[in-house]
Amino acid sequence: MKRIYLSVLLVLAALPACRKDKSAASPPAGATHVPGTPHTDEVLNAWRTAGLAPEGFAFAPPPANTASYCEHGKVRGVDTTVCEYANDQALDRGVQQVRQEWARIDVHTGVLLRAKNTTMVAIDRERREPSGKTISQMAKVFGKL
């Protein structure tokens, strides 16, 4: 979803010590997690614990005036971006950008969920799982954070 994140955000659509694959990009100086909302790493760890095996998550630069910190990767082939927002206004702008991007690229299956000031954006771009089972499992775990 770095494609979507950077596509929207190309878009958006983020995920306790920023544990990433050795090949993952490091966030730039000044990119920090938002206090008081689930951090991207907490989301990734929760998915791992649930057996969802997130892969390739790395920092994804958020669009101006939206998220403070985002990560993009895949969960069982589903493009996913998790972002942390400093406040409700920034979150609203981020959600609006995601929806505009979805309309522009004609997203077939996509989910945008919120837990406090953190969002999960999942898109099955390659239509790898028409049943929606993975996205449903991701959503359940995310909703408990």
Image (spheres, rainbow, N blue to C red):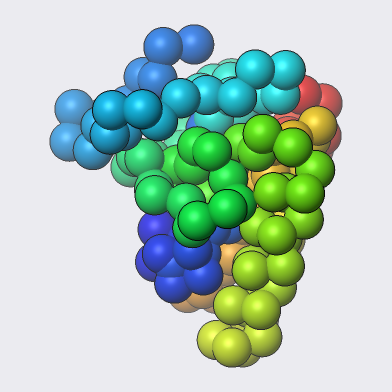
Residue 1 visible, this angle: no
Tell me where residue 38 appears, x and y as whole percent. Answer: 67, 24
Query: Compared with residue 75, is residue 92 higher up or lower down, i.e. above or below?
Result: below
Residue at (70%, 60%) from the top-left corner?
93
- Residue lying at the far left of the rendered structure: 23
Q: Is residue 12 left or right of residue 113?
A: left
Q: Nearer the viewer, residue 133 or 24?
A: 24
Q: Nearer the viewer, residue 50 or 46?
A: 46
- Residue lying at the far top of the rendered structure: 16
Q: Is residue 35 left or right of residue 139?
A: left
Q: Quadrant of the C terminus?
A: top right
Query: Compared with residue 128, is residue 122 higher up or lower down, i.e. above or below?
Result: above
Residue at (71%, 24%) from the top-left corner?
37
Tell me where residue 91 appears, x and y as whole percent. Answer: 72, 49
Q: Is residue 5 left or right of residue 88?
A: left
Q: Nearer the viewer, residue 91 or 81?
A: 91
Query: Compared with residue 83, is residue 134 higher up or lower down, i.e. above or below?
Result: below
Residue at (72%, 17%) from the top-left corner?
36
Residue 33 visible, this angle: yes
Tell me where residue 43 appears, x and y as whole percent. Answer: 60, 28
Total tally of numbered discs in the picture: 0
Query: Compared with residue 98, is residue 29 higher up or lower down, i.e. above or below?
Result: above
Q: Nearer the viewer, residue 89 or 129?
A: 89
Q: Quadrant of residue 34?
A: top right
Q: Is residue 101 left or right of residue 30?
A: right
Residue at (72%, 67%) from the top-left corner?
96
Q: Quadrant of residue 103?
A: bottom right
